[in-house]
Amino acid sequence: MALIHCAGCGKRISDKAPTCPHCQYARDSDPEVAERAGRIRAIRHNQTLMTHSFIALLLFVGGFALWWWGGEAAEGWREPVGTGAMALGFVFYLVTRVRIILARRRA
Ligand SMILES: [Zn+2]
């Protein structure tokens, strides 16, 4: 028994399995089905990335609001938490943008 990569989801499955236990992709199905599965996977991946960039923006805006509460620069715990959330949101957003560009280029 050897392990191969599933054409539907990319996970490692047994070459003896007629269908993938992870995504039910039938290994011997016609190329049209395989293509459709690939397209659905790309759409799902895109939606995940969109959700990630939305979370990153929320984190950034939330961090800024916390830091700039009441129009003054934050003091005490709000300062490290606010700037931390802003930095994290900013980096997370940049990483997600790069992943979106890479995903589009692959499609
Ligand atoms: Zn699979």
Image (cartoon, rainbow, N blue to C red):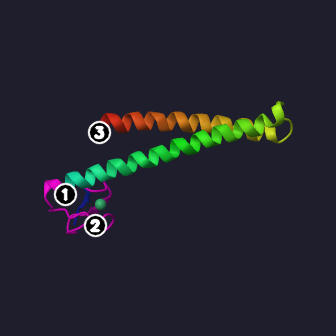
In the image, the segment drawn in magenta is 8-33
Q: Left of 49 or right of it: where is 83?
A: right
Q: Amino acid at mark 3?
A: Ala
Disc 3 element: loop
Q: Left of 86 or right of it: where is 43?
A: left
Q: Few, some or many C-alpha atoms within 10 Å of disc 2 (few <14, some 14-19, many ≥20)? A: few
The residue positioned 86% from the left and 39% from the top of the image is 76
> In x, y percent, where is residue 51?
50, 47
The reply to whether the magenta stretch includes residue 44 is no
Q: Left of 27 or right of it: where is 104?
A: right
Tell me the number on the disc at residue 33.
1
> In x, y percent, where is residue 71?
82, 31
Which of the pair 103/71 is nearer the observer? 71
First along the sequence among labels 1 and 3: 1
First along the sequence among labels 1 and 2: 2
Q: Amino acid at mark 2?
A: Gln
Tell me the number on the disc at residue 24.
2
Disc 1 element: helix
Q: Few, some or many C-alpha atoms within 10 Å of disc 1 (few <14, some 14-19, many ≥20)? A: few
